[in-house]
Image (cartoon, helix red, strand yellow):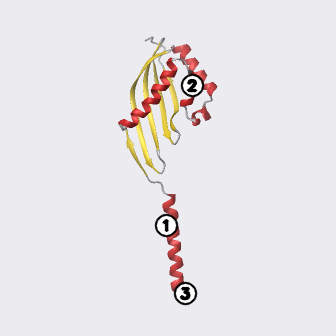
Amino acid sequence: MYIRRLFISLFFIAISQTCLFISSCHFNSSYINREEDRKDGEEIIDKFYGLLINENYKESYKLFDKRFFEVTDTQKLNNIYNLAFNDLGKVESYSIEKWETEDIVGTDARIKYLFQCSVKRSNFASKETLMLIKEKDGIKIISYNVNADTLSKK
């Protein structure tokens, strides 16, 4: 009788440990560079540059993820906009030169996007990189970088 109780107790301990192990695991799979993900990300890129072309900076803040503003507050972002517009000129047009996406499906679901854009500005052209992420609250910009070679006027 004692051995039977011991066996049953050990069995339930083993089952509970297995359940804990399984519940702590993360099950994910990923898809790289799917066309539908690119299209979803491009909608945000189009909105972003549409706002910059119309110089509607404050409205563009809504496109940024809260984590972006933990590092760069709205005043700093506005300074970046002003510096780029003062030195490089107004955004006239843009084209996406390169894009990458990673769609992670499962426990830690999210989609990451990378867009590299060639931006025609009134004074100098720039190369701009935007990183986006799609989580529960939609697609948001998490990184924005502007590079320009101001030594040669375009």
Residue bearing the label numbered 2: 59
Residue bearing the label numbered 3: 2
Residue bearing the label numbered 1: 18
Callout in the foreground (2, 1): 2
SS assignment at label 3: helix
Amino acid type at mark 3 = Tyr
What is the CA distance from the residue labelled 2 to the residue labelled 3?
72 Å
What is the CA distance from the residue labelled 1 to the residue labelled 3?
24 Å
Position of 21 relative to 5 (above/below): above
Amino acid type at mark 1 = Thr
Q: Earlier in the sequence, mark 1 or mark 3?
A: 3
| Within-10-Å neighbours for mark 3: few <14, some 14–19, many 20+ | few
Q: Earlier in the sequence, mark 2 or mark 1?
A: 1
Residue drawn where x is 62% and y is 35% of the image:
70
Residue drawn where x is 48% and y is 61% of the image:
22
Q: Could you tell me residue 113's position as x and y percent?
A: 44, 35
| Within-10-Å neighbours for mark 1: few <14, some 14–19, many 20+ | few
Number of the label disc, if any, that sits on residue 93 = none
Q: Earlier in the sequence, mark 2 or mark 3?
A: 3
Residue drawn where x is 40% and y is 46% of the image:
30
| Within-10-Å neighbours for mark 2: few <14, some 14–19, many 20+ | few
